[in-house]
Image: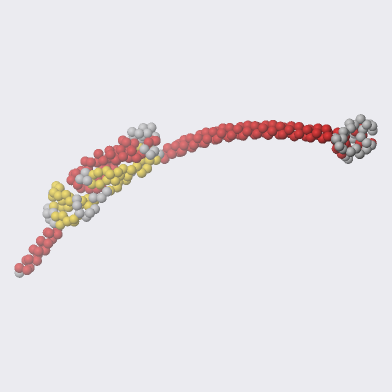
Amino acid sequence: MKAQLILPIVAVLGAAVLSSIFIVDEREKALVLQFGQVKQVKETPGLGFKIPLIQEVVKYDGRILGLPTQPMEVTPLDDRRLVVDAFARWRITNLVDFREAVGVGGVDAAQTRLDRILNAAIREVLGSVPSNRVLSEDRTSLMNQIRDRARTESGALGIEVIDVRLTRTDLPEQNLAATFARMRAEREREAADEIARGGEAAQRVRATADRTVVELTSDASRMAEVARGEADAERNAIYAEAFGRDPEFFAFTRSLTSYERSLQSGNSSIVMQPDSEFFTYLRSDLAPADRPVAVAPAGATAP
């Protein structure tokens, strides 16, 4: 009889003990609530205890969570509209404030409120700068400003915004065609400027090359004339020396050269008198009577 009573009591006690124990994973944080009031905060992993049937355990994700925002249109200072979306990383830092702020909605309710905070911060920060800053490398400082504003606003929710990144900053579809046309016109203007500068540089190079050709040609002609004059002078000197040594032989060789050049077959005709001095060496093998007589050097034998 006693055994029959003890077994149910043991079973009830065992169930009560088991229901009073809860386990917190290393990825979780837990609150122990009693009639909706926070009685215990469990942020470290391990076993926890609660009063069965009176207290309940609510667990939240203790990891860093991500929140992508929906695309939105932002108007910077220069009235050039942009389509922007962002990605935020956040985590729960104060379970009590988080529970009081979001109630039973939990993480989903917190993300909804954080999304509104991020949208307001993005519009405020990007609306205070021109669009070229949003599209340049200066965007990093703008993202930090958005993060700081969102962190300040979300502190009352018991969460911390760790980082905010702008994942897209594009023009609206209706503005893309006009923007592309303007970009194309700017590139064509830059190309025309480059072509004009290249043509100007080519003209300068061409003019320099032409001047160099003229200068080189002039120098070469001058040097050729100088060389020709020196050669003529040297030739004349040789002729004069040869004529001085033997005038008769010199006159004879010059006459033979003239005969060779003038008596060739061809269509040319020469009308001359037979007793002309040109035919002196053809009429006789003797030199002309009035030719100069060469003086034999001393010690030479007369023929």
261 sits to left or right of 198: right
Residue 134 lies, in percent from the top left, at: 37, 37
Residue 159 lies, in percent from the top left, at: 23, 44
Position of the N terminus by quadrant: bottom left
The foreground one among 288 and 264 is: 288
Q: Does residue 200 appear in the picture of this structure?
A: yes
With respect to residue 294, does 5 lie above or below?
below
Total labels drawn: 0
Residue 227 lies, in percent from the top left, at: 72, 34
Residue 146 lies, in percent from the top left, at: 30, 39
Outermost residue, top side: 290
With respect to residue 38, does 209 lie above or below?
above
Q: Does residue 279 appear in the picture of this structure?
A: no
Classify residue 211 by image quadrant.
top right
The foreground one among 247 and 169 is: 247
Position of the C terminus by quadrant: top right
Please say which color scheme the image uses.
secondary structure
Q: Residue at x 30, y 38 (%)?
A: 145
Q: Residue at x 32, y 36 (%)?
A: 125
259 sits to left or right of 188: right
232 sits to left or right of 202: right
Q: Residue at x 76, y 34 (%)?
A: 234
Outermost residue, left side: 2
Q: Residue at x 12, y 54 (%)?
A: 51
